[in-house]
Image (cartoon, grey):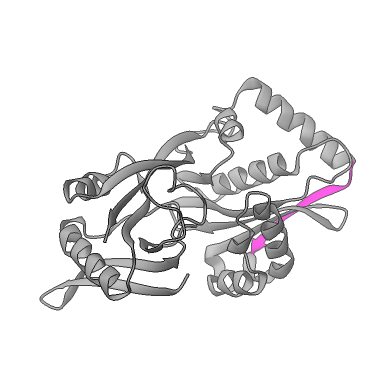
Amino acid sequence: MQSFRYLVVREGGRPVAVLPVSLMDGLDPLGQLRARYPVTGAERGLLSHVWHCYDAWLPGAPALEAVADAMRGLALELEADWYGFVNVAHDSPLRAGLVELGFSAEHIEDRFRLDLRGLPHPFVHATRKARANLRRGRRRAEESGVWQRVGIAGEADLMEIGRLCARTAARHGTGGFYPPELFAGFVTGLGDLALAIEIRQEERLVAAGIALRDGRRFHAWACGVDYDVTGGFSPYALLHAATAEQAVREGCEVLEGGRGNPRFKLRHGLSRLGLDACLVKV
């Protein structure tokens, strides 16, 4: 990322829309655009939010045209090749408005979520096999000295968690998303909005997640998993279960399960929401 800016639209001095944008020297770090747009991936792009944000949206939608104009002007100023939004919900008014303004919309990824309202527990919609696997995995984990801890993230060892997240992401070519010191500083700055969920076998960290909470939604934002365990259980499944149960304990309406790993998430009752890129060449 080369730079980061905020676009603010005002009416009579009052802010009516705000959009964070990032200038990427290499607009396609996840390799999701080059198969859908005429790009190599190395181009400079002025993009909404950051790639790691799976929920791009714009407060103050009536100001969308003004925001699009401002993005184009800034893209020209910064000598970007493309500009636009990534990770826009497929069925959102934002996507429809951007298409109307001439942005080219292409599906790039899916995110997964679970509506918790009215559920007695978060595994109601999981398959029978998934529930059985979870029960068996928990029994094996307990027999193998596994325990879990949930607490304010800033009070956990965020360097250790960051390193595990980076190693896990590196298997998919995105380990650079978690520079441990930057990660630790950012999460600490969130205060009690960020929780750390740790799964340990004896004292060794085998799975960890950072969850963000906004009062209504519980976001499974970042995770790391070490599958080199003894006892025949899945640390990832235990982490998902602990995260979902914490969301219920906090009275959240929605568990945001992030992107990727569709087979696991669909088996565990989460629903799919398509994410699109909406881009224009400068």
Q: Position of residue 80 (x, y in %)?
A: 34, 67
Of residue 234 and residue 156, the one placed in the foreground of this image is 234
**Residue depicted at x 22% and y 70%:** 73
**Residue depicted at x 36% and y 61%:** 48
**Residue depicted at x 55% and y 42%:** 260
Q: On the rendered structure, is 160 left or right of 66?
A: right
| Above or below, comparing residue 254 to residue 222 in the picture | above
Q: Main secondary structure of the magenta part?
A: strand
Q: On the rendered structure, is 2 left or right of 157?
A: left
| Above or below, comparing residue 193 to residue 273 in the picture | below
Asked if residue 118 can be seen in this view, the reply is no
Residue 84 magenta-highlighted: no
**Span colored in magenta:** 144-152
| Above or below, comparing residue 100 to residue 212 in the picture | above
Q: Position of residue 120 (x, y in %)?
A: 55, 33
Q: Position of residue 128 (x, y in %)?
A: 64, 21
Residue 147 magenta-highlighted: yes
